[in-house]
Image: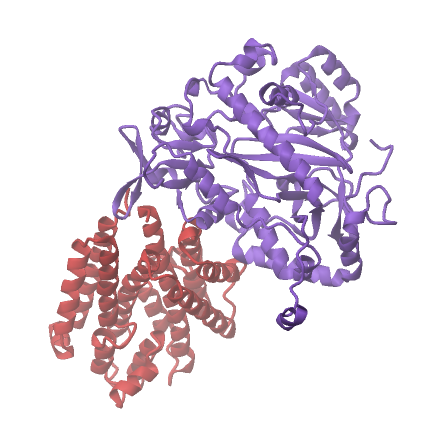
């Protein structure tokens, strides 16, 4: 990876001599806005985030230790044509994910046809045999997917990870945009930027479209574990923007396989639940009996077809890291065409040859637990200590099936405001894809996460990463409106 | 609206009101102690603890009664469930869990007040304490302002209902304790200490000027009781709080299409207060009247919780 410098989204590989053609304007904006002014605006944005309580709780610390995720004022920009390609690829991918889930919890043709080893799926801890044979309303399983992407060159985007359970971060996409419009309005005069603020409208219509009861106005709710959850801000933000109730388990009760919420006027029947609680916790009767977060009987109501759960229980099988390496085959199998968005090359350590390859090159690879997340349980070879590498070597030998390995990618960089001025920092990107009864919809935007430490490739917020606004440029540049008088005399 | 949401909003209203009242109480006690004709001393601080129902808790801290220790206990002590800090913690926690029912402005007012107190460890001297109390009152005003700009829907009604129930309780407790604890046996009614103490009560509820407007007379205990118990145009009076509770329950009932036991109790109480006179109250015993009111208020609180299914 060290043979060439990382690709910079603005400068390309030219390391600062000339911006890529589409981004000259942004380069000029960065050059012409004094760093002190950028710092001032950035602090104003972060102060506003703190005041609004856009925070995430850090587990194990008290409430006073709530943190805001650092925000970077220099946006990341996609050209219209870049986005069009991504959008088509994403649509293809989430279509395949839903087809795969329908097949796995249905006839399982893909196993019969030998596309994926059966044991990988049947022994997978994410498989929920409890929902086998249950077709969710309108056949949609993964209503909300966050697809993590990285970029290494002008036309080289890779999918790093699929998130098909309860992906978070979309509130940052929306709040970051608000902050940018307030603090850097001139950027939106320089560029015609595609709007993102209709995301919550789309999310609501997606949820409404999959109601199990035709003919009545669907009652949708958002189910949260409560305000101690690290993503609670997002839960309340989304419920608020959609105008639906934000419920906790105690607000729901199941009677005769029908879900009700307790209101000041009595019970109201619930049709669609956007749940932000993991499978294991949603119903103590069917899953973890020790969970206080869940609603007893919820799964029975789901199995009876009386309520829609978004995302459906069992979607974890589609974003499992061990399954991920087969996504190109999965996409091809269900859509009939090659995957438009490639995977990062992945070595499945359960395969002896891949394990040998991995063990030989630990110091150049990234090794991940197949069921890990949030940057935990991960080895970044090039920056790891010798002791860490040896610890992973032992773990890999003992339980190879729990790991995958990937080459260390030269993630693209984006100019970022640092103490020492503007400097390149590595980024990734998570767009959010909605699937309802009427197909896939993707708002032009997403969450760009940025590794704030120099050279670091770790962008997780729990590991000190920050976020940026992601601007998708429109194809038809907004034309400045001529003054009314000029129009009148124009002809 | 979810029953849990309604309960959180109601308690949000109560806690913000309680935090503000405690700030006013500290400020007024400090005035009494520092500015009165003769130093009021420990008696003033003892009665402040009594009004806040914090005597036993303070005694357990092992501190002696002096301005800084009492102020710290009433304002900042996390072990005191009714300290300003505890109230703001509870208010913010309630506000956070029902953010979807509040406007941004209302949430920000709570969060700002909470942030302002979060890192405060010591009460500081008199000047710092007065500044702190002033800031908290400003935050409470900001919250009230935000509340009045919210939709006139169930959400704002529940917050205001909680505030009114709490206010009725606070005012009753304030009059009761000050009236009976502060006047030393040897003092003449109408003497300087007595006058200072009645002024303190009026200060606590921001009613000094109101008193002068309404009565154009020197301080007379009977008139103070009239003002704080019976005058509905005085926002913190028992009569005004009772009236507001009736109105808010009525508004909720109209929106929800039903009424219940809480409405009946509130209306009955309001009618009783409407018929009462100062002379009648004092003849029957002011203390007995206030104790009965406080007990009644607590039953009303329980009826509200039941009527709106606060308890799952």
Q: Residue at x 47, y 19 (%)?
A: A105
Q: How is the image coloured?
A: by chain
Q: Is residue A46 above or below residue B213?
A: above
- The chain letter of the purple chain reads A
Where's residue A140, x and y in %?
47, 29
Residue A373, can we see it? no
Q: Residue at x 63, y 73 (%)?
A: A485
Q: Residue at x 44, y 63 (%)?
A: B75
Q: Residue at x 70, y 27 (%)?
A: A342
Q: Residue furthest front?
A: A491
Q: Is residue A289 left or right of residue A65?
A: left
The number of numbered badges drawn on the structure is 0
Q: Is residue A43 above or below residue A442?
A: below
Q: Residue A303 occupies which quadrant of the picture?
A: top left
Q: Is residue A133 above or below residue A377?
A: above
The C terminus of chain A lies in quadrant: bottom right
Q: Is residue B291 left or right of residue A205?
A: left
Q: Colour of chain B?
A: red
Q: Is residue A118 left or right of residue B61?
A: right
- Between A10 and B26, the residue placed more toward the observer is A10
Q: Residue A420 occupies which quadrant of the picture?
A: bottom right
- Between A231 and A338, the residue placed more toward the observer is A338
Where's residue B298, x and y in %?
23, 57
Residue B58, can we see it? yes
Where's residue A41, x and y in %?
67, 61
The N terminus of chain A lies in quadrant: top right
- Between A449 and A142, the residue placed more toward the observer is A142
């Amino acid at each position: 990876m060290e043979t060439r410098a990382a690709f910079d989204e603005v400068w390309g590989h030219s390391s600062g001599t000339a911006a890529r053609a589409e981004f000259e304007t942004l380069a000029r904006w960065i050059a012409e806005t004094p760093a002190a002014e950028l710092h001032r605006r950035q602090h104003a944005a972060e102060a506003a985030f703190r005041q609004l309580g856009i925070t995430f709780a850090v587990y194990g610390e008290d409430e006073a230790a709530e943190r805001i995720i650092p925000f970077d004022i220099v946006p990341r920009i996609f050209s219209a044509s870049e986005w069009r390609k991504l959008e088509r690829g994403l649509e293809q991918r989430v279509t395949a994910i839903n087809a795969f889930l329908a097949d796995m919890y249905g006839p399982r043709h893909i196993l019969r046809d030998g596309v994926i080893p059966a044991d990988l799926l049947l022994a997978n801890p994410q498989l929920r045999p409890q929902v086998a044979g249950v077709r969710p309303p309108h056949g949609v399983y993964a209503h909300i997917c966050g697809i993590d992407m990285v970029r290494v060159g002008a036309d080289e985007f890779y999918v790093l990870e699929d998130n098909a359970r309860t992906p978070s971060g979309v509130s940052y996409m929306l709040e970051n945009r608000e902050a940018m419009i307030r603090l850097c309005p001139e950027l939106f005069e320089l560029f015609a930027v595609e709007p993102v603020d209709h995301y919550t409208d789309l999310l609501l219509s997606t949820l409404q479209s999959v109601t199990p009861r035709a003919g009545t106005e669907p009652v949708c709710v958002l189910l949260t574990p409560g305000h101690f959850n690290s993503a609670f801000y997002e839960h309340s933000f989304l419920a608020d923007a959609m105008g639906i109730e934000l419920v906790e388990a105690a607000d729901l009760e199941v009677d005769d396989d029908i879900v009700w919420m307790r209101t000041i006027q009595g019970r109201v029947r619930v049709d669609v639940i956007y749940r932000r609680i993991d499978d294991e916790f949603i119903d103590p009767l069917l899953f973890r009996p020790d969970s206080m977060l869940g609603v007893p009987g919820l799964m029975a109501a789901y199995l009876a077809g009386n309520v829609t759960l978004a995302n459906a229980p069992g979607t974890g099988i589609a974003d499992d890291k061990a399954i991920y390496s087969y996504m190109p085959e999965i996409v091809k199998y269900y859509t009939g065409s090659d995957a438009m968005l490639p995977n990062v090359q992945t070595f499945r350590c359960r395969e002896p040859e891949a394990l040998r390859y991995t063990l030989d090159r630990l110091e150049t690879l990234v090794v991940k637990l197949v069921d890990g997340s949030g940057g935990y349980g991960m080895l970044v070879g090039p920056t790891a200590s010798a002791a860490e590498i040896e610890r992973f070597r032992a773990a890999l030998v003992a339980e190879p099936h729990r790991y995958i390995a990937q080459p260390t990618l030269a993630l693209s960089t984006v100019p970022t405001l640092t103490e020492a001025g503007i400097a390149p920092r590595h980024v990734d990107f998570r767009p959010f894809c909605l699937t309802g009864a009427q197909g896939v919809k993707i708002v032009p935007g997403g969450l760009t996460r940025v590794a704030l430490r120099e050279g670091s490739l770790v962008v997780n917020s729990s590991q000190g990463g920050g976020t940026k606004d992601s601007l998708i440029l429109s194809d038809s540049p907004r034309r400045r409106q001529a003054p009314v008088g000029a129009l009148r005399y124009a002809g | 609206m979810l029953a849990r949401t309604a309960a959180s909003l109601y308690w949000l209203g109560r806690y913000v009101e309680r935090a503000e009242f405690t700030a006013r109480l500290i400020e007024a006690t400090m005035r009494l102690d520092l500015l009165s004709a003769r130093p009021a001393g420990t008696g003033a601080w003892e009665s402040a603890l009594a009004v806040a129902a914090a005597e036993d808790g303070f005694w357990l801290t092992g501190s002696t009664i002096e301005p800084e220790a009492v102020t710290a206990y009433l304002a900042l002590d996390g072990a005191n469930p009714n300290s300003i800090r505890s109230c703001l913690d509870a208010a913010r926690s309630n506000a956070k869990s029902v953010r979807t029912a509040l406007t941004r402005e209302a949430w920000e007012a709570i969060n700002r007040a909470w942030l302002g107190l979060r890192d405060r460890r010591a009460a500081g001297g008199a000047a710092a304490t007065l500044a702190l109390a002033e800031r908290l009152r400003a935050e409470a005003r900001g919250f009230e302002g935000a509340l009045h700009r919210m939709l006139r829907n169930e959400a704002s009604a529940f917050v205001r209902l909680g505030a009114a129930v709490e206010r009725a309780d606070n005012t009753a407790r304030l009059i009761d304790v000050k009236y009976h604890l502060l006047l030393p046996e040897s003092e003449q009614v109408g003497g300087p200490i007595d006058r200072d103490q009645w002024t303190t009560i009026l200060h606590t509820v921001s009613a000094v000027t109101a008193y002068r407007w309404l009565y154009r007379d020197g301080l007379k205990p009977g008139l103070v009781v009239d003002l704080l118990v019976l005058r509905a145009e005085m926002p913190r009076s028992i009569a005004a709080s009772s009236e507001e509770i009736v109105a808010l329950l009525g508004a909720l009932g109209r929106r929800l299409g039903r009424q219940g036991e809480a409405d009946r109790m509130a209306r009955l109480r309001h009618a009783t207060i409407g018929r009462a006179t100062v002379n009648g109250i004092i003849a029957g015993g002011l203390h007995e009247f206030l104790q009965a009111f406080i007990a009644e208020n607590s039953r009303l609180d329980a009826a509200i919780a039941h009527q709106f299914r606060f308890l799952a």
